[in-house]
Amino acid sequence: ENCRNKTTNLAHSNSDILCSCVPPGLGGSFVPDTTVWPWATLADRHRELAVGGRWRPGACTARQRIAIVIPFRDRDEHLRILLQNLHPVLQRQQLEYQVFVVEQAFPHIFNKAALMNIGFHEAKKSIPFDCIVFHDVDMLPADDRQPYTCFQSPVHLGAYVDKYKYGGLYVPMFGGVAAFTKQQFEDVNGFSNSFFGWGGEDDDMRLRIASARLNIYRHPVEVSRYRMLQHRRDHRNPTNPFRGVAYRYRPTVYARNGVNSIKYKTHAYEEKPLYTWLLVEPVSSV
Ligand code: UD2
Ligand code: MN
């Protein structure tokens, strides 16, 4: 099913056996496990991973190589919960992947969109990915049939969230989890670097996508449910008072403010057992 029409099968090797269109080991919907295990226990349970949170199927060639980018700061428990649910899903889907946690150094106001742009540049250095998935740390997949892969349009994977009544609350949203091919992400020039604090960057991305004449693809609600972990607003992520300011939404701005203009410093890089960790600091607003 996944292979028909919309999937782009990007694996380059012709000599190997490609993994099948519908991975054989999928289990359908499940209840995410929200137990908080110590990191050492998690590392022990995930010996299948190569250092840095890398994995690929042993018996076939994955149809796509995926970079998972998690914008992050100060949500250690959420990260543990997410990873213990996400790794098994990606493996059942027979994907080749690497997980990147892009953490923003204190003390500045959180800039999730800038972290995602940085994740794009950093991931390129480690894995020749076909598809990049931006993933909120608190979004737990609850069905392994929704593929973490790219299609002809950017995919909004996080469209149906329990907290938002599985999409019944707002319709035009683009938050939570989303997948882009390299080309799609460059065509929209990534995210704006100008959204500090909570809100707006996902709406700006919807407009970037429309402005690049791309559509947004969403999988059927039956397979694409997420559970969002409860949390309060974080320290240093206040609501952005400019989140709705219209001048941000100008196509002329998109071309010069985005993944092509992000500047940042990397303070730390470490390949941990479950993920590759980057501690970064965006250094300019445009
Ligand atoms: C919604 C969107 C989210 C984003 C946000 C507005 C969904 C399901 N989620 O999430 O994608 O667009 O609104 O900005 O539509 N984070 C940290 N540390 C912090 C602050 C944020 O790690 O101090 C990261 C983390 O990955 C988190 C994400 O940023 O999941 C989004 O922040 P949030 O969870 O506070 O925002 P929320 O739930 O309103
Ligand atoms: Mn959240």
Image (cartoon, rainbow, N blue to C red):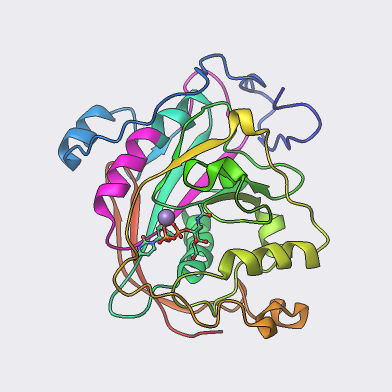
The residue drawn where x is 50% and y is 82% is: 241
Which image quadrant: the N terminus? top right
Residue shown at 73% from the left, 35% from the top? 7
> In this image, 19 relative to 152: left or right?
left
* Percent coordinates x, y for residue 22 in the rendering: 64, 19
> Against 243, is 80 above or below?
above
- Looking at the figure, which quarter contains the C terminus? bottom right
- Residue 204: quadrant of the picture: bottom right
State left or right for residue 86 relative to residue 96: left
Residue 169, compared with residue 54, is above or below; it is: below
* Left or right of 55, for residue 164: right
Residue under the point 54% across and 80% down: 194
- Residue 29 in magenta? no
Q: Position of residue 202 (x, y in %)?
A: 59, 63
- The answer to whether residue 285 is above or below residue 31 is below
Q: Residue at x 71, y 56 (%)?
A: 183
Q: Quadrant of ligand 2?
A: bottom left
Tell whether position 74 is magenta.
yes
Residue 233 in picture, x, y percent from top left: 35, 65
